[in-house]
Amino acid sequence: MTPEFTIECLLTVDNHLGEGPIWDVEDQCLYWVDSTGRRVGKDAIWRLEPATGDVKSWPLDADVGAMALRTSGGAVLALSDGFYTFDFETGQANLIAKVDDDPTRARLNDGKCDRRGRFFAGGMDDKEELGICSLWRLDPDLSLTKVDNGIICSNGPCWSPDDTVFYLADTFKNEIWAYDYDLDTGAVSNRRVFASTAHDAGFADGSTIDAEGYLWNAQVISGDLIRYAPDGTVDRKISMPVKNITSVMFGGPELDEIYITSMARVSHPATHDNFADETKPQFAAGGLFRICGLGIKGVPEPRFAG
């Protein structure tokens, strides 16, 4: 019997493109980014302390795909053109390394750290049509390695609890991939299709893994939060109050709460008609949502070791 659960909108922050939630187990707060918020004059990095309701945000001068907290303090960011450190006290971002994907239309998108503190982030074609982007690994020594390519829009990087499988979605290829993963070296191999969204109403966006090894994926366009079993079959589906949900993360003192980001933007590339023809956002689109009461726990999110 499925436990009763609740869905609530915690914040109506009107994120242009909310993404990349990270639960900080040390300070018991949630960070996330508004990837393209700066395009409409909004802040880019956000933090919520659920216990107090305190919200803080920081601006950036570039689009931001993802961030990870650092063991040494501050954060590491995947900005449009490369990887940067970020200081929360000064609000300054400093370049670590640039990527060599086409700067005229490719930008870094979703990213996360493995349990050795390596930061993975992949690119996306801003026009959402060509496989011109790569997947990158930033190691703790700040060296940068290209680990895959031919990607249209990378999303949802995450690892199985035993660190033997790496997952990544290419949103507009309608696939979530699984790779064999070598935790000692950070190498990926044997890419195969874990799940297809070709016949779904939505497209795979951000993902996370729970303590049982099931993958949770936020489907943009349909508003469905889907839990996949380790064999790629759909275990359950939760319909969210807004259609354009973007990513998901476990949090809370017991890691048994689920936080979901969403987008408020209504204009999209003209190269495809995947997004609904909206004249205005849905109510609470761009807000931060939380699900409680499912009785499922996540795993702690690692920090970048550099």
Image: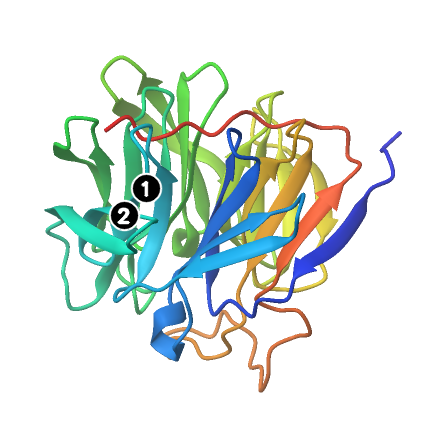
Residue found at the far front of this picture: 89
Q: Is residue 181 left or right of residue 225?
A: left
Mark 2–mark 1 CB contact (< 8 Å): yes
The answer to which of 202 and 278 lies nearer the viewer is 278
Instruction: Measure the alpha-carbon separation of dots 2 and 1.
Output: 5 Å
Residue at horizontal 27%, vertical 47%?
Answer: 86
- On the question of residue 34 being in view, the answer is no
Q: Which residue is mark 2?
A: 86
Give the x, y percent position of residue 136. Answer: 22, 39
Q: Residues within 10 Å of mark 2 (few under 14, many from 20)?
A: many
Q: Amino acid at mark 1?
A: Ala
Residue closest to the far bottom: 279
- Crowding at mark 1 (Cα within 10 Å: few <14, some 14-19, many 20+): some
Q: Residue at x 20, y 28 (%)?
A: 139
Above or below: residue 146 compared with residue 287: above
The residue that label 1 is drawn on is 75
The local secondary structure at tag 2 comes to: strand
Q: How is the image coloured?
A: rainbow
Q: Quadrant of residue 85?
A: top left
Q: What is the x, y in percent for residue 49?
A: 59, 46
Residue 33 in the image: x percent, y percent? Answer: 43, 55
Where is 137 relative to 180, above or below? below
28 vs 282, left or right, is left
Q: Tell me where residue 9 sits by quadrant.
A: bottom right
